[in-house]
Image: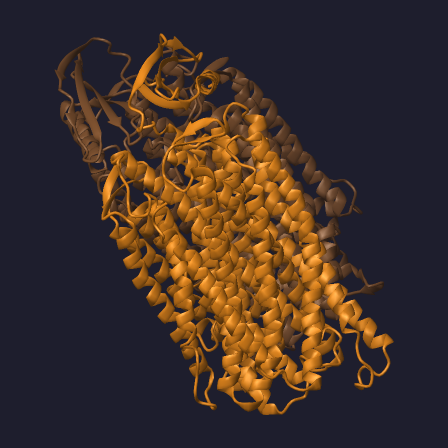
Chain colours: A orange, B brown
Amino acid sequence: MDSIVIYVPLIMAVLGLLFMSAKRAWVLKQDAGDGKMKEISEYIYEGALAFLKAEYKLLAIFVLVASIALAGIAYVVPTTHYLIVVAFIFGAFFSALAGNMGMKIATKTNVRTTQAARTSLPQALKVSFGGGTVMGLGVAGLAVLGLTGFFIFFFHYFMNGQWAPAEFEGITKTPQELMTIVLETLAGFSLGAESIALFARVGGGIYTKAADVGADLVGKVEAGIPEDDPRNPATIADNVGDNVGDVAGMGADLFGSYVATVLAAMVLGNYVLRDITAANPAFTDAFGGIGPILLPMAIAGFGILFSIIGTFLVKIKDNNAKEAQVQGALNAGNWVSIVLVAVSSFFLVQHMLPETMTMSFYGEAAKEISSLRVFYAALVGLVVGGVISSVTEYYTGLGKKPILAIVQKSSTGAGTNIIAGLATGMVSTFPTILLFASAIWASYAFAGFYGVALAASAMMATTAMQLAIDAFGPISDNAGGIAEMSELPKEVRTRTDILDSVGNTTAATGKGFAIASAALTSLALFAAYVTFTGIDGINIFKAPVLAMLFIGGMVPVVFSALAMNSVGKAAMDMVYEVRRQFREIAGIMEGTAKPEYGKCVEISTKAALREMMLPGLLTIGFPIGIVIVGMLVYPDNNQLTAEMLGGYMAGVTVSGVLWAVFQNNAGGAWDNAKKSFEAGVMINGEMTYKGSDAHKAAVTGDTVGDPFKDTSGPSMNILIKLTCLIGLVIAPILGGHTAEAAPDTTNPAATVIEQREPVVVGQQEEQEIQVDKQVDADGKVTATVTVSTKTSTDEIKTEEKVFTGTDAEVNAKIEELKKAKGAE
Amino acid sequence: MDSIVIYVPLIMAVLGLLFMSAKRAWVLKQDAGDGKMKEISEYIYEGALAFLKAEYKLLAIFVLVASIALAGIAYVVPTTHYLIVVAFIFGAFFSALAGNMGMKIATKTNVRTTQAARTSLPQALKVSFGGGTVMGLGVAGLAVLGLTGFFIFFFHYFMNGQWAPAEFEGITKTPQELMTIVLETLAGFSLGAESIALFARVGGGIYTKAADVGADLVGKVEAGIPEDDPRNPATIADNVGDNVGDVAGMGADLFGSYVATVLAAMVLGNYVLRDITAANPAFTDAFGGIGPILLPMAIAGFGILFSIIGTFLVKIKDNNAKEAQVQGALNAGNWVSIVLVAVSSFFLVQHMLPETMTMSFYGEAAKEISSLRVFYAALVGLVVGGVISSVTEYYTGLGKKPILAIVQKSSTGAGTNIIAGLATGMVSTFPTILLFASAIWASYAFAGFYGVALAASAMMATTAMQLAIDAFGPISDNAGGIAEMSELPKEVRTRTDILDSVGNTTAATGKGFAIASAALTSLALFAAYVTFTGIDGINIFKAPVLAMLFIGGMVPVVFSALAMNSVGKAAMDMVYEVRRQFREIAGIMEGTAKPEYGKCVEISTKAALREMMLPGLLTIGFPIGIVIVGMLVYPDNNQLTAEMLGGYMAGVTVSGVLWAVFQNNAGGAWDNAKKSFEAGVMINGEMTYKGSDAHKAAVTGDTVGDPFKDTSGPSMNILIKLTCLIGLVIAPILGGHTAEAAPDTTNPAATVIEQREPVVVGQQEEQEIQVDKQVDADGKVTATVTVSTKTSTDEIKTEEKVFTGTDAEVNAKIEELKKAKGAE
């Protein structure tokens, strides 16, 4: 490997992590306030750590079991290497580490933000966003570090760091085949990351809403004490929940998306290379011939750098600034990093790809395209990332038409409020899905599925920035809570409220970004799956495939229901505990006795961990079950099983995206409809405020929306990504690599060793199979098998397959083909 | 046509209509009660007629516009005959006629049921079920009459009543091709029926809920008067709504399903024939060689007979009978007709199909199967029809676990009640979708997509019985309303309440049956679409197809939201009108002045008609828009456009079924959770009744559920069926018939007229096209075109296409093929 380029993303990742460390040190150096504030912050920190510890214990067991299963697959399937287990464990570990780091810094930053808010708003923003930056860079840095590190390792391990034929387990393989093994092994890293994300998102989502609902129902409604009142035993759990759900959950989600997107783009880059080398066997570039595979990593790497630059722009100077200025500062940082990614993508594409390249579009002949089209595909991704935020804001933002409509409907009761909220969420799928569909179509038209994956990669390149903006919300929310609980002067709370309010908007748009990234990532994974299995696309006109499309469509719905029910159950546990404490601990309401905060934290933790089992099982169990059923029913037709699993993946993705958008936006809309009453709203010509009947109806709507937007909605992202990743890891079991169909162009000196006479197979039709075998200088056997079939309409269809490998391997494949044809 | 069999279904239909007339006369002969009862019943009758009249006026315009559009298509596309317009108009007319008849008898039966309930419960059941029977037989009779009548007409018009080659517009066509034209023209009848169903279901759904919500909100909640109180101005509109929505809407829905199912099965029967005659060109049977096409009609015809037999079993003797006995009587009738259909299907399959038949399964070679497997496929349909009712009852039935859980959750407020209801609806998709997926897979495995269509046909064969059971519900509901409004003795209301309560259960299970039928029908239509367009399946690995799958998935969600919002708007109109009457008409509350019932009826009518426009536009506009976009973007590749539309259809079907099940079951569950409070429920160890806080929470849930279960949920059926039907009608524009690829085996004397040299087309790859032309004695040209392509992996793929027709036609097709290949 002559080129240094392969190490560039690694350097960027390290740079990001170094900058993060510096920022972290700065944040921790800030004043953490006085006794009471410190004490409360300490409670939240401890609670968060307690959850993480309990979660990690459970996850360790899961990782162990999954590793054994993966090792089993590696043992049985020759093309799956045992190193996938190592990658899987590291993926899980890195994801957990990123979550841990993020949560620690968030729970340290909250109190420092409160303290900073005592002096000025600009300082409070600086501290809270600083905490968010640490989180964002930690996640992005670790993702790129892990992925590129493992890629370099596997590239050297399996391919000696060069694009050339080499021996693998005694068989000489083409560079194409070897790279496929590299990337399949690397998929383990992504699978590990996404598995942790499932539990972090679902568990975190259940935790946060159980604590929130429990605290509200007993504290606010039954006991009549305000939010974040220190007399409420569940209030610490509630604040912990913000960190567990919004910080750790979102972090794990985007960590998973980031890794999966880049991985999928690399897999598809390998197939781009196949087309290029097929047209020009002597192809090479400045990157040892693997430019298209390195490109997504390079874009991701530079994205870290530009996110850092963007963070410098997030600041305000005016102490009397309002939400608009704070939002403006965040937007400035965000847009600058997006534009920089766009510019750098242009140069990277120009630099790393050949000027024109041969690319085959599915179902069409290969064609020559300008590499600039890959850049256009990347632009599509950036545009989607930007537009989705506006769409989400329109349907969920304070003062927007849909929110005002919900507010009006609240005047006729909770029923009409809820119908209006549901309808808003449902209608919001219209522009969102049209946007996604156009993005898929456009980026594919530009550069095939490689284009779709590159669109996702470009969009995800600013992950560090997105997460910084996202994490800043719950930090400010917590800061406000601490101010309230420590009974600080009103202006402190006013300042944190400004930050919190902006945080609510960024939370909604962040969810839009997360679902857009999940959708594009899943499609890229889906495309990678199809190429890995080597199937001829996914034809839903085959009834078993169609049946799986239906089942796939159903799973996100049931998953959401399970998550919602879990919140209900966990919240009830919390309600009973809070009631018990109010009853049994004397003096709690007078503030003379302290509530047992720890008990509530424990209950939320336990409930979350218990309740995330079933949804997790559903996610992992269904794809595996389909493969088992498919293999049992069609023992000779793995390709059909692969198509069935593909149909399932498509069903989960389409339905999952729909339900994510519906639930996130309905939840966000109800939330802000309720919030509208704080400043007062005009209903039927009358100003209406908090405490009115209409407000009560809006509160009911928000109760319904809470699990929608914080538990089941965001979980959809993980469900669809994990489903497609599991498919990708299973793929080698189901399919021969398509790469093996590519003849070895490096060994033209071949001798004919066998030419069999055509034989008739199959019963109902005239079908002939003819075999020609050749062997080259290295002893590699190439068999050309021609199948001629006279169909019922008297057409003759001829199909040629080329198998390579040892003589025994080739014979086995021929027999398999005959069996498959004869069994038809 | 020697066989008389083709006329059998027609005879059955006439028999059904005759029996219906007799039953109708009997019902009308019953005592219609005294003055006040008669007066109220008259109001309802007039209101229902007013709605129908206004609706028909609007529909006449729609039918006119659609007819012109269809005539345009017929003019442009040579294989579409102008008779499709005639079929379309008759389809619309028959559907409207069936709705009209059903609604008239329902509004006449209600008061007679009330009067009968003054004497005894058995008599009340007899009268109300008699009215339902008239409705059921009317719908089924007209459906079979219209469909078979037009089939016989077209069969004679295009094919001279025999399975033989004939001339069509100057070109000699194979019987296969001619039958395709017959069935495509017949599709107009189905399209007409389903278009009316769209408006009947959506308009009816909006009407009934607007009136219901309006009456409840002002009458029950604001004015505090009981349900069905004659002082409430909206009460007549409310009772009209039951008839408009539940009787006319459901009738039009099932009329459409019935026709579409049988049609789809006939289309697929034509392709079964292709396989049979390909294997055995001399094939013939006792039915002029078209047994497989006649079979679905025969099953439907006998279904009418068995439904009549079933109705005789629906009776009770005990005047003190409770819900269980009434339900038992209905079940007995239903099961007997189902079993009879099963038995008759066995004999019909044995009689009408060859003992073994050649059938080609998609992607596999043709194989010889026993015709008994077609019977098994039909059994699958009957089982699904039965099981779906049990599943629906489990999730929505009084006293079942999910309902009890919702009741418990009502104690913590409306929010938790609603979350529980939503979750119940969502979870209910699990068994339902697994059932559907298994049914698709199993019936396909037995007999291909013909099996899927036959499963649907068998299930629909008992439509008359299903509708009788279904229509009996709203009749009883009305009867109760009349008893209340006429201030009859309490025992009358008690008796009608028993019938009403059973009616609520049958309404829920009927909705299950309707969605199951819609799902299977859509799949059968989907399969018919693929065969009509002659595409190679629907491959969602092509990005434009995948994009359309996403858009298709979104449409049912947005459609539902529009329907829900429409209910909200229409209900508000009603609320304002009722308030106005209470305010302006003095003495209304004292019962000394009469409310203006007509005004409320008018408002509901206007609002329903206005609000059904946008959902209707969405349903019809999207498929047409996709075809236009596809043809603009890919002018040379109609096949890709056809696949895109297919992807859209699949998306609508999968998502539509999911949302139908979710909304119907959630709505049913909330309704019965609320009803549970009437008898009292145990919550946290305390008996809780109507008027409690928990009950109020349950009422809120029911408000949300109302549009779910009566408007948006049931509309999904029509949306998915109509989408697939529109696709089917558009199909000839997009595809050559596959039938034309079948060589004319009846004319073996052919001469070679041209053999062109291979030419190279396409740019990036080596591709050759070779043409061999022959002409037979009739001047029919057969060209064999061989396309050899060397792909990027050096495989050579050979594809042979056979075109037949006049020389000019064949040349045009060859040029088209070359263009398509060259453009790749």
Residue A749 vertical placement versus B528 (above, below)? above
Residue B82 position, x and y percent, is 26, 37
Q: Is residue B571 visible?
A: no
Residue B587 vertical placement versus B308 (above, below)? below
Residue B377 lies left or right of residue A5; in this view the side is right
Give the number of callouts: 0
Picture quadrant of residue A629: top right
Residue B639 lies left or right of residue A208; in this view the side is left
Residue at x 35%, y 43% (from the top left corner): B644
Residue B651 position, x and y percent, is 44, 46
Residue A630 vertical placement versus A806 (above, below)? below
Residue at x 39%, y 71% (from the top left corner): A309
Residue at x 52%, y 26% (from the top left corner): B445
Residue B757 vertical placement versus B263 (above, below)? above
Picture quadrant of residue B586: bottom right
Near-viewer residue (A520 or A41): A41
Picture quadrant of residue A746: top left
Near-viewer residue (A352 or B213): A352
Q: Is residue B818 visible?
A: yes
Near-viewer residue (B706 or A790): A790
Near-viewer residue (A49 or B529): A49
Residue at x 48%, y 39% (from the top left corner): A646
Residue A759 position, x and y percent, is 39, 9
Residue A571 position, x and y percent, is 71, 65
Residue B356 lies left or right of residue A360; in this view the side is right
Image quadrant where one finds the N terminus of chain A: top left
